Image: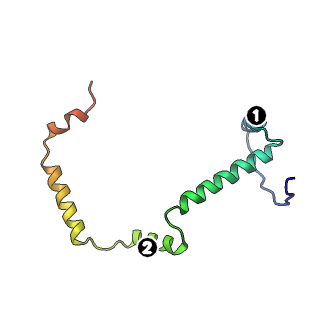
Amino acid sequence: MAKLVNDRIDIRISKENKDLIKYAAEISGFKTISEFIVSLAKNEAKRIIEEETRFLKSMDDNVLFVETLLNPPAPNKALKSALDNYNDLLNSFTPNDFESFRKKP
């Protein structure tokens, strides 16, 4: 038995969108459009939360991540060396080395 609730979300949509949603709800086996919308919204909300919290598990992780983006540490010796190696590699190529990547007319 469905749990009765008293919260509401009111939205306005075009007739075309309502008809489309109603049809999808019917062929999916839902008794009402509301059940269909709540089910989809709940599943999508869970997916978004899972995706957003996959790497940053806590609020402290989120704060540290944002602070690091806003105030990045100075490059260390290893990073500077990696950049030098990358630039050396790029500078060793000639324009013809990339010919195979260009679109053919």
Q: Nearer the viewer, residue 39 or 105?
A: 39
Amino acid type, residue under disc 2 in the picture: Glu
Q: Residue at position x 55%, y 57% from top?
A: 51
Query: Position of 19 compared to 60: left or right?
Result: right
| Residue 69 position by quadrant | bottom left
Q: Nearer the viewer, residue 88 or 15?
A: 88
Query: Position of 13 compared to 64: left or right?
Result: right
Amino acid type, residue under disc 1 in the picture: Ile
- Point out the residue furthest to the front here: 1
Q: Residue at position x 78%, y 36% from top?
A: 26
Q: Is residue 93 above or below residue 78?
A: above
Please provide percent x and percent y for residue 71.
38, 73
Please provide percent x and percent y for residue 74.
28, 73
Q: Residue at position x 78%, y 38% from top?
A: 29
Q: Residue at position x 50%, y 66% from top?
A: 56
Please provide percent x and percent y for residue 19.
76, 35
Q: Residues within 10 Å of mark 1 (few under 14, many from 20)?
A: few
Give the residue pinned by disc 1: 27
> Element at badge 1?
helix
Q: Is residue 50 above or below residue 70?
A: above
User: In the rendered structure, which disc, 1 or 2, sits on the residue that comes first in sequence?
Assistant: 1
Query: Position of 84 compared to 39: left or right?
Result: left
Give the residue pinned by disc 2: 67
Q: Mark 1 or mark 2: which is in front?
A: 1
